[in-house]
Amino acid sequence: MSDDLVIEAKGLTRRYGRGPTLAVDHIDLAIKKGEIFGLLGPNGAGKTTTILMVLGLTESTEGTVSVLGHDPLREPLQVKRRVGYLPDSVGFYDNLSARENLIFTARLAGIDKAEAGKRIEESMARVRLTDVLDNRVATYSRGMRQRLGLAEILMKRAEIAILDEPTSGLDPHATFEFLEMIRGLKADGVAVLVSSHALEQVQSVCDRVALFNKGKIALQGTVEELGEQVLGLRHDLLVEADGQDIAARLGKIEGVSAVEPPGSGRGLLVRADRDVTAEVVAAATRDGGRLRQIRAIEPSLQAIYNRYFEGVKDAA
Amino acid sequence: MRREGSPFTGTGAVFAKEYADHLGSARMRVIEALVVIVGVVVVWVAMRDLKDKVTQDQFIFLRLFTYAPESNPVNFAGLLTFLIPLVAIGLGFDAINGEFNRRTMSRVLSQPIYRDALLIGKFLAGLATLATGLIALWLLVMGGGLIVLGVPPSGEEVARGLAFLVIATAYGGVWLAIAMLCSIIFRSAATSALTALGIWLFFSFLWPVIAPAIFDGILPLIAPQRVLAGSATADDVAGLLDVQQLIMRFSPTVVFQEAWLGVFSPDQFTEQQIMRIRLDPRLGHRVIPGSPLSFGQSLLMVWPQFTFMVAGAIVIFTLGYVSFQRQEVRA
């Protein structure tokens, strides 16, 4: 195992019951120190099972997993001491305050009392819950609970944070804030493993992603790599310009395959298979045309995912 | 393959949290109310009926626990026989499924502890809560008795009272283990509580009816020929009585009743006990029928019952432990 890998899984498999279907089917994962890795896919694709096997909370049927150089089943305490876990729709003891909840966790984690008090203040400040630190958790909104879960991971000074569906059920603002906090973890050098079925939300924070489908990892890599692999090398542009026959003019540029109205908003979507930015600018500004906006369109994970599984379905 | 680290890491933390939760919970208010009501009633009855007998009775403080007025033949210890299981079930029926339902289980188990710590910590906290209530009740009755009767308890009476507390806690442990087993098996707290209460009803009220019927059924199979012919020796009768008692003893309620009778009634024996005393060489040569047993002799009498309850609690706890270890964490 190389030094900068924090989680390494090989052929990891989990079978429930005696049926032929595998909840997780021979997956390989390698997560590096300090990166944000996304496990993406629909519900029931095997993301949570994979996470539980990484944590040693579920036994694998086959394959090996190594977390920070330890086997989570044989040395569970070593692993759990250094890994923080935020489960899907996390729960806390509602009758206790946030501080009391964290004190309990700190005691379980073996953090001494004075140190725990200090760390709780710090981590709650980082997730901006200082004002409600002594309120009962029953009064917390869903977004606040998720942040409290993150504070727990911060308090533990975990080297790996595993977040299961952290943004599901959050409103857009809370989602945005939470994603910012995930970036904050990365800045601390923490490796983050985040699972989600909301591809678009998580796309923005992940360095690399693995797309799950029916227990298998269908694709793995950076979003750009996956885009290239599935959609081909694309250089799509969104152009907003005033002038006569802009669409026709842009369509004549060599390499442009289509000019069409975008799915939403104003302007034109220019589909191209090479970088045509310079030609588009020239064409749009000719004959008194005025270019208002031009930007490159990143491949969206949703598009990649849809395209990929359409392809898989057709093949099947 | 040896596990790394101690299975008890974190047990203290779980115990402290659960004990604090129990003491602060609404359930504890109910238990406290029960304790006060039961204590006051017992002392009141004692004041009414026992006050005049102070000078005649050597064990007047023990009568506080075993005396039953004729109008209502339930004494204090008998009441506890029913009350302790109820309280224990109340404390344990949602121990494990509650963690799943609050969605705290996976978060807690992702901390560096083993599942053992959670289960053991919760069991001990429930037991400590139960013991706290029992001690409070015992002190209340003893204190009230002191005021009403006007004489201090003898050292032996205090010792017998303490022995009763230990036995009652062991009895509570059996029911707590049953309740926790239900909370592991059933995800719904209501199902778990109902099942535990069903078990309690069965062993408290139905088993004493069923057990003699079972005995009658198997009697022709186990009795020696001469008994059936109508010429039984004392040994035969004692042996058959033992079998009948053995069937009865599948119910923890019956075992507990035997135990508290042994501790609290050193001078009142059942026919069968007298027979056992005569036949048992360890007891026989030291006991004079009609005169009370010494404290040591009483302990010797109830020791098997006590061991049975402790062993029962451990066996049931182990069943729960095994099924909890295999349980899927995901909610």
Image (spheres, coloured by chain):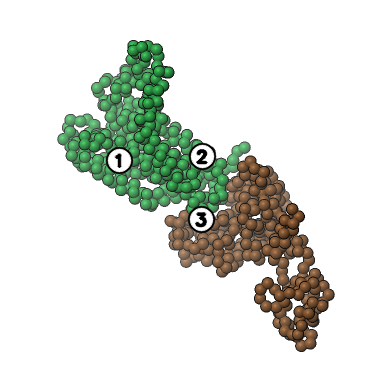
Chain colours: A brown, B green
Residue at the spot 47% in from the left edge and 49% down from the top edge = B98
Q: Chain of mark 1?
A: B
Please state which of residues B70 and B38 is positioned toward the viewer in this rendering. Answer: B70
Q: Amino acid at mark 2?
A: Tyr
Q: Badge 1 is on which residue?
A: B138
Is A93 left, or right, of B145 in this rendering? right
Q: Is residue A157 above or below residue A241?
A: above
Residue at the spot 27% in from the left edge and 43% down from the top edge = B39
Residue at the spot 51% in from the left edge and 53% down from the top edge = B103
Q: Amino acid at mark 3?
A: Gly
SS class of the residue under badge 2? helix
Residue B240 - label? none
Mark 2–mark 1 distance (CA, rounded to whole Å) = 32 Å
SS class of the residue under badge 3? loop
Q: Amino acid at mark 1?
A: Trp
x then y, percent, for residue B13: 47, 48
Residue at the spot 74% in from the left edge and 63% down from the top edge = A227
Please state which of residues B278 and A297 is positioned toward the viewer in this rendering. Answer: A297
| Of the image marks 2 and 1, the number of the one nearer the N terminus | 1
Please state which of residues A5 and B89 is positioned toward the viewer in this rendering. Answer: B89
Mark 3–mark 2 distance (CA, rounded to whole Å) = 23 Å
Q: Badge 2 is on which residue?
A: B321
Q: Quadrant of the N terminus of chain B?
A: top right
Q: Is residue B34 above or below residue A251?
A: above
Q: Badge 3 is on which residue?
A: A91
